[in-house]
Amino acid sequence: MNPRLKFGLVTVIIVGVLGWLTVDGIDSDATYYVTVEELQAMENPNDVRRLRVGGDVKENSIARKGTSVEFTITQDETELNVVYVGRDPLPDTFRNGAQALCTGRLRDDQVFEARQIQAKCASKYEAKPGEGVSPVYDAKPAENKASL
Amino acid sequence: MENLGYLTVLLGFCLAVYAAVAALVGKWKENAFLELSAQRAVAAMWVMVTAASGILLYSIFTDDFRLSYVASRSNADLPALYKFAAFWGGQEGSLLFWSWILATYSFIAVYTGRRIHRDMISYVVAIMMSVQTFFLLLITFVVSPFQVLMSGPQITPMADGNGLNPLLQHPIMAIHPPMLYLGYVGFAVPFAFAMASLITRQPGDRWIHTTRIWTMVTWLFQGCGVLLGARWSYDVLGWGGYWAWDPVENASLLPWITATAFLHSVMMQEKKGMMKVWNVVLISATFLLCIFGTMLTRTGMVSSVHAFAQSPIGPYFNVYITLTTALTVFLILSRLDFLKSENELDSVISRESSFLFNNVILLASCFAVLWGTMFPVISEAITNEKISVGAPFFNRVNIPIALVLLFLTGVGPLFAWRRTSVDSLRRNFQWPAIVSIVFGGILFAMGITHFYALMCFILCAFVAITIIVEFFRGARVIQQKNEMWLGRAMVELTHRNTRRYGGYLVHMAIVIMFIGFAGTAFNQETQAEMGIGDKLPLGRYEFVLTNLTEDSNANYNSGAAVIDLYRDGEFLQKLEPERRLYHASGQGTGVPAIRARLREDVYVVFAGLATEAQKPVIQVYIKPLVNWIWIGAWVMVFGTLVALIPSKIKRIAPRTRVVATAKKRHEVFAK
């Protein structure tokens, strides 16, 4: 057999196996991103294997109970209670007012059980995706920032 | 000061534009003076960008809180090292830092290469300056580091800054971004040389030598940057891991993968005149992935823990990447005839094919990682639902890839060019294969049954044996001829062919790192809410909480959990994981306590206080073999530096070309 053909065959096998691993991997690990409103509007949230919900951590709602952590996230007017049962430590940026991304599933008692938390601090120079700058501290940079 | 800063950046931008245009016009009109002027403009631009960087650093060190960048990234009590790091702590400053590194690289590339590559240096200047123009355009007109804070018509300084993100206040984080930038930016140089050689249809591969050296240095910086990030993640973030397959992490890995592929396939071009098109594609892909990585990190298009703020520079990057990709593809397609191969693939068991498989595997990994990283964007575009994938996906795909790559690392260097005989195969691989399989059997009998980990250990043994045998064989020959110690013979052997033996050292480094990675399969962990005197067991260890202490300094307040560590009943040491609250930013962080040993790390985190009982929550991990990763990293640095040393004997690679094939015996006598 022509060496080019042999090489091509081995390559096809390698790529094929990897392609299968990729597709299967995406299938079993796919995480659907929803907003709090969308989550509560979902009919059968338990059908989806992995959900990711984003929202702001409500002031003074963080309660550490033993090895799990309970808190509430808000998005505009809607609220969602979350309990974090994962084994990794919570990120350092996780605190009141931070943006939290919670990955997990919605329990029957409408509490979201998160296995993974990502948090970003919403400081005045970092905007939430899709929104404007939200001032947190007293001194505010005004709208007209000059560059000269 | 900020006015001066702005002026220097603007001048730098103008000079970059001038240099690019003058170089091209000078080349086309064959005006040597214009070409020289363009080169000098590169130097002048460097002076401007350096001045701008100096001014920003000055503003940071003098606590000039009128500037919004200084106010947001620094504070008065910040230690000096981190004030320096604040230079690249935010979007605007890091872009300026990027530009400064690009200016420095351009200056060095142009001034060291302009005599050797006289006929194409102007194109190199033009390409590098066009990249610089883009970045300086962003800095001058879109996201300037010299913006001042104003309320109404008045410049209003803040009383104190917000300080550097406490997570970044760590020595490793002071080096990690510079290393990464030295890598990211550096790939522009080999790209420029490759493109210039295409444009001018360089005969011979003089440019390959220059490109290869630049790529190796840049590859080393990038690799170090990636590993430093992993080390920081492990030491500081407190989740006990070193790689999360986060989009920004992936972005830094992608160009490193293609650069690794390039470093290997370039050998095929040097020795056999093959893979010319492929090599240009690879180096272009590496550069484009660098720009892409920069874009990913800065525009927040994929959600990530690392991502900078949403900023207006996204569309600019989109346009730039599209334009550059289009131009590159056009250039390659228009020179396809010039890039034809001089040789053909003869056998599947040959050095050529092992390089080809190396490339296929690496590119497959690159594609899989890119696909997984961009999946949320792609899925949202197609199905209107944002779907993301995480670490399980990436591990699932990359672990088999890595194992195949490990196998190739062992067999590839020992295959012969063109075709390897069965005899040679048996001679080289029989004993290493037998020994490693027996080794695997022993491990299995000892209780290591995790499939991937076992495979990894067997392959690591296999590769390590082949490399050590190579060193011994070569050294023995030299030793016998020259009557020296074996050790000295090994040094001599390496010095005679630094590329090859330096490369073997890097392969050995990869083996060591893989042993470290395989340790993850045996991680153990547990956590509990503990009172003073409580005991927490894990594996052979026992953790006893003895005290809670508090402390404070100008930068932060801290609380520590004092824990006694026992193993098999015997006291080992005290571990004191901390929680800190930084004054300036109001942010809290955890500092894990780590007992690092060759066999395993004991890793303890003070997660916080349970809200009701106010008792500390302690998380403990056992991480086997983690230190092998950091040791492997050092060996990689050493091996690359060795490979960069010029060989004692200047090897002129004989270019071979098939002119005729002898008939086989039975064909001759058939008739």
Image (cartoon, coloured by chain):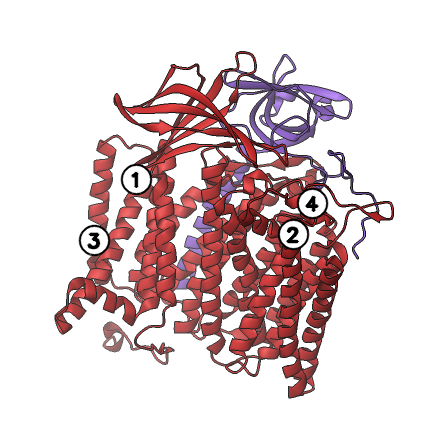
Q: Nearer the viewer, mark 3 or mark 4?
A: 4
Distance (Cα) linking label 2 and label 1: 44 Å
Q: Residue furthest right?
A: B153
**Which mark identifies residue B583?**
none
**Which mark identifies residue B598?**
1
Q: Are marks 4 and 1 in contact (CB under 8 Å)?
A: no
Q: Nearer the viewer, mark 2 or mark 1?
A: 2
Badge 4 crowding class, 10 Å Cα cut-off, few under 14, some 14 to 19, many 20 or more, is many
Q: x, y (%) of residue B254? A: 53, 52
Quarter of the figure that contains the C terminus of chain B: bottom left
**Which mark identifies residue B62?**
2
Q: Amino acid at mark 1?
A: Leu
Name the chain letter of the residue that bears numbered label 1.
Answer: B
Q: Residue at label 4?
A: B71
Q: Which chain corresponds to the colour red?
A: B
Q: Are marks 4 and 2 in contact (CB under 8 Å)?
A: no
Identify which residue is drawn at 76% across, 58% down. B141
Q: x, y (%) of residue B155? A: 81, 49
Marks 3 and 2, the one that precedes in the sequence: 2
Distance (Cα) linking label 4 and label 1: 43 Å
Q: Is residue B331 above or below residue B436?
A: below
Question: Can see residue B406?
Answer: no
Q: Is residue B471 above or below residue B379?
A: below
Q: Residue at label 3?
A: B430
Distance (Cα) linking label 3 and label 2: 67 Å
Q: Which chain corresponds to the colour purple?
A: A
Quarter of the figure that contains the N terminus of chain B: bottom right
Where disc 1 sits, the SS reads loop
